[in-house]
Amino acid sequence: MLSKIQKLLPFGREFGSGSRAIIANTGWLFADRILRMGVGLFVGVWIARYLGAKQFGLLSYATAFVALFNPLAKLGLDNIVIRYIVKEESKKEQILGTALWLKLLGGFVSLLLTVCCIFLLRGDEQVTIWLVGILGISGIFQAFDAIDLLFQSQVQSKYTVVAKNTAFIIVTLLQITLITIKAPLIAFAWAKLAEFGLGATSLTIAYKVKGYSIKLWRWSFPVAKNLLKESCPLILSGVTIAIYMRTDQIMLGEMLGDKAVGIYSAATRISEAWYFIPMAVASSVNPSIYAAKEKSEDLYYRRIGQLLRVMILTSIMIAVPMTFLSGTIITMLFGSDYAEAGNILAIHLWASLFVFMGVATSSWFVAEGLTNLSFYRTLMGAITNIVLNLFLIPVYGGIGAAIATVISHGCAAFFSHAIYPKTRKIFRLQIKSLLFFRL
């Protein structure tokens, strides 16, 4: 058995001479996320206990509401920009400069729409409006993640890890101080915004230390036109992803109140903490997949299949034990006030199987120029989630929302691929990757 599993994960064989850089880069990203998962979970639990289910639910509601509009700030540019830099590294200043200005514009538009919508929905709740407005500013600072895209294209994410973790540690200490001095709810929103501001500053410093100069970045209308032409479907896809990732919390808040959101968020904080794994692996592997597309179709699909198998195996290894320990974990971490979150967690964990598969196949949609179909699959997931939530939340509460989430992720990242002729090839590859459990 062990020998077969070892053969299943031959990164050196499938990813060639760049495998050492990929593994090192993934190691840095894992170190980053493990630190954030460990420290962030500890402090997040402390904040949840301090605020109580209702106030924690309100903060989670505001965070989820802002997340709905966050794709407008990112503009779906990340993987496209990385691919452009890999193909035309000599034009990286032009590509990055254009991406920065596009993201800044998207950040301001996102903030404006977020505030306008929360006014329409909860215009009489001043605290909610302030929370959403403060957290919404973060989209502007995220424009400087364009620097990270260069590091990703060069498989050198360690610079981003150091920069952003510096900001994370400073803000973590600030949050602990806020709990100690019994600060109000609004202070924690300002602390979260400070993390994005410090992260942008740290990235800029890291870029300069590396020997680059952001002053060389320049705007190019033709580049902007090409980037937006490819990213438009991904923007819509990002919005629909945000809907089926966060609409459960918003619908719970509107249908059952903020306390229900707090209990549900306690479960998702544990479940979604593992989502860093596919992001870390994919961000390191994607450049080599794009490069393989230019060399050999066989090598290209071998690499995608390899990534899929690793993702599926990892997600199941996480979900199975966590399902049986969910109740104990919730009570131990959050206390008896959040006990209902145990059953929610046991179900919600299984969304990770489809999340991991979705991340693994996202590079295929970009490389194949099928970003429009990527939008349709996520739209299917969003519609499924909303419809199921309408029926399940009134009857089953947070458990119903968790069931809706798992099914909608399955529709978006797996079953939808069987519908379109152009995506059936990746669907067959997913089936083949699932069948490796014949081991």
Image: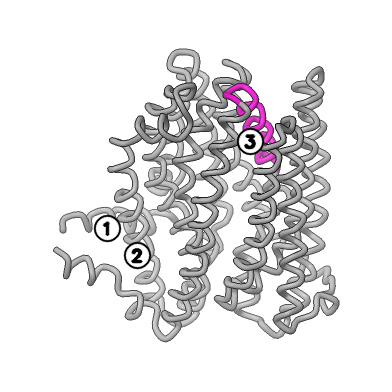
Q: Secondary structure at mark 3?
A: helix
Picture quadrant where residue 327 is located? top left
Q: Is residue 66 magenta?
A: yes
User: Which amino acid does the dot numbered 2 rest on?
Assistant: Gly
Outermost front residue: 180
Cα gap from disc 3 to disc 2, whole angstroms: 33 Å
Picture quadrant where residue 112 is located? top right
User: Which amino acid does the dot numbered 3 rest on?
Assistant: Ala
In this picture, residue 194 sits left or right of residue 298 = right
Which residue has dot 2 on it? 305
Residue at 70 percent of width and 81 percent of height: 210
Which residue has dot 3 on it? 64
Cα gap from disc 3 to disc 1, whole angstroms: 35 Å
Which residue has dot 1 on it? 432
Tell which circle, 1 or 2, labels the residue nearer the N-terminal end.
2
Q: Secondary structure at mark 2?
A: helix
Is 88 above or below relative to 277? below
Q: Position of residue 334 (x, y in %)?
A: 48, 31
